[in-house]
Image (spheres, helix red, strand yellow):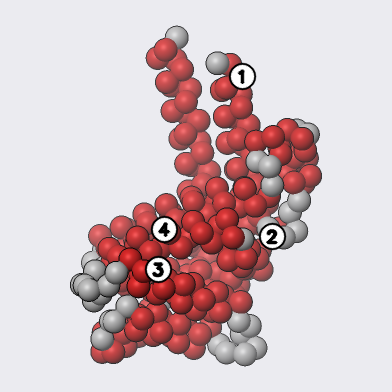
Amino acid sequence: MAELRKSKLIKHEIIKTATALFLEGGYSKTSPQMIAKELGISTGNLTYHYPTKEHLLAVLVEMLCEFQEKLIGYEADKGLGPAMSICIELMTVAAACEENEAARDFFVSTFQSSMCLDYLRKSHVERAKRIFAEQCKDWTDEQFIEAEILVHGIDYATIISSNALLPLDVRIAGALNQILNIYNVPEEIRREKIERVLSMDCHGLGERVLKEFISYVENTIDDAFDEMINNRKKKD
């Protein structure tokens, strides 16, 4: 049992450290050796828990999806609605990638990882079914999957595009218009939502949400470890 607790503690610390390194220095520039050195463990110990760097990225993507769901709920509580929350989500990610090279590297890497992309698509398909149920009443599961493939392509293009080609607000407006149109949102409503999104401080939101995600990962890991310790005390 002591070995199990030690193993879980190491896994928690690995994720916390990897998150900091990925989002501060960049996923591509962070090696397993760097993570192991930061933790003071061997690379072999690290790869025992997470065989590849992509496995670490996949864990973070799962946590990112959970974080985004919480943000959607928070924005909905403010009366913005889930569709509007998705628009804000794309804007904040695009803005964070525009301002922060490490963040851009992280998000681009998630799109380039088949492991992460499969999880993202499954998660976002279920989200789309819930949010756009009224606009897509007669859609089959296959149609939602096809739509999400298109949406991911638009998201990716928005993130990797350089501001030398198109300004951020133009890219965001174009992407949101295409995405909402895919899900049969009427033009008038699309225009209203896009105008509302563009009226916000996208750069400030992008920076704030990125910091909140890092804090979310740290707090989630700490809470999980505290729960493990408390459960062990109850058994003892």
Mark 1 lies on residue: 3
Is residue 208 left or right of 131 when viewed as pictured?
Answer: right
**Mark carried by residue 145:** 3
Is residue 93 left or right of 34 when viewed as pictured?
Answer: left
Q: Which callout, 2 or 1, points at the residue further toward the start of the chain?
A: 1
Residue 40 position, x and y percent, is 76, 34
Spatial CA span between label 4 and label 3:
11 Å
Count of residue discs = 4
Query: Badge 3, how many Cα within 10 Å: few under 14, some, many 20+?
Result: some
Residue at figure coordinates x 29%, y 69% from the top left: 140
Q: What amino acid is at disc 1? A: Glu
Viewer-side residue, 147 vs 102 = 147
Choose mark 4 or mark 3, whichever is in front: 3
Spatial CA span between label 4 and label 2:
24 Å
Q: Which callout, 2 or 3, points at the residue further toward the start of the chain?
A: 2
Choose mark 1 or mark 4, whichever is in front: 4
Residue 54 position, x and y percent, is 65, 52
Q: What amino acid is at disc 3? A: Ile
**Mark carried by residue 26:** 2
Q: Which callout, 1 or 4, points at the residue further toward the start of the chain?
A: 1
Q: Which callout, 4 or 2, points at the residue further toward the start of the chain?
A: 2
Choose mark 2 or mark 1, whichever is in front: 1
In the structure shown, which secondary structural element does the residue marked by tag 1 occupy? helix
Residue 24 position, x and y percent, is 66, 57
Question: Do residues under tags 2 and 3 come within 8 Å of each other at their CB atoms?
Answer: no
Spatial CA span between label 1 and label 4:
33 Å
Mark 4 lies on residue: 123
